[in-house]
Amino acid sequence: KNEVEQSPQNLTAQEGEFITINCSYSVGISALHWLQQHPGGGIVSLFMLSSGKKKHGRLIATINIQEKHSSLHITASHPRDSAVYICAVRSWVASGSRLTFGEGTQLTVNP
Amino acid sequence: GAGVSQSPRYKVAKRGQDVALRCDPISGHVSLFWYQQALGQGPEFLTYFQNEAQLDKSGLPSDRFFAERPEGSVSTLKIQRTQQEDSAVYLCASSLAPRGEETQYFGPGTRLLVL
């Protein structure tokens, strides 16, 4: 079992739909990151959170530390939101901190 | 300002060849990370530098992999005697704070194909 699991693996939506991507983890963490990866490899950090909820534009990220679960929501989805969304958890190791990544959720938003 | 840059963007190598991948982090960033991302998978940690010190290399898959950051800025990931299983995207990320405590900024990656 992976330390970070995302669901669904693939998600297809129609423009305007509300989207939820889930992330569960099994290790103690200091923070959780949501990242966006477009074709060609570029990764952009969307959120870093350790509790509660954060919002940026149409994106909302929540985390429940007790349940070791986080969700990324996209409201009023748009084709330009099509990308791979990756959950990564930051945990402490002897050298500092390390990110462990989920396998990603491929989102396709059709017009 | 300039983000993290990596070169080359694409590299095709014959099996057994040595390759060197370069990462230019954001100026002033203390932490530098290398990740390996296989097709359809999430990135996996390879190694971490705090300035010029390589504090964690536990993710390097074999002794054919070697990384350095001699002056605490540019870093090079070297793979000796490449194998087909080394084919992947190699991502570099940098972070302002030590110990990777803040947001990591990713480069575009180097896509390595070993034939």
Image (cartoon, helix red, strand yellow):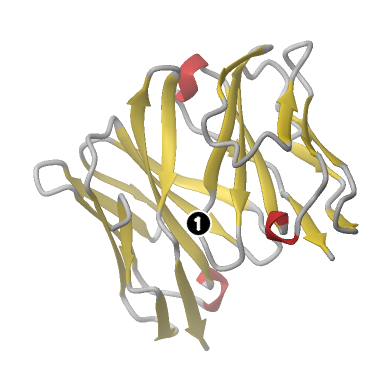
Q: Position of residue B62 (x, y in %)?
A: 63, 39
Image quadrant where one finds the N terminus of chain A: bottom left
Q: Chain of mark 1?
A: B
Which residue is pictured at 73% across the width and 20% down the height? B27
Residue situated in front as seen by the camera: B40 or A60: B40
* Rendered view: A61 above or below A13: above
Q: As displayed, is residue A42 above or below residue A30?
A: below
Residue at the location (40% across, 80% down)?
A11
- Locate residue A23 relative to residue B32 in the image: left or right: left
Residue A53: image quadrant is top left
* Residue under the point 41% across and 43% down: A100
**Quick check: B38 above or below A108?**
above
Q: Nearer the viewer, residue B63 or A78?
A: B63
Percent of width and height locating residue B103: 49, 32
Q: Nearer the viewer, residue A6 or B3?
A: A6
Please tell me which residue lies in front, B77 or A74. Answer: B77
- The three-letter amino acid code for the residue at tag 1 is Gly
Q: Secondary structure at mark 1?
A: loop
Query: In the image, residue A70 lies at what x, y percent?
Result: 24, 53
Where is residue B30? Give x, y as percent: 61, 16
Name the residue beneath numbered marker 1: B42
Residue at the spot x=33%, y=63% of the render? Answer: A6
Query: Tag 1: Cα neighbours inside 10 Å, few (<14), some, or many (≥20)?
Result: many
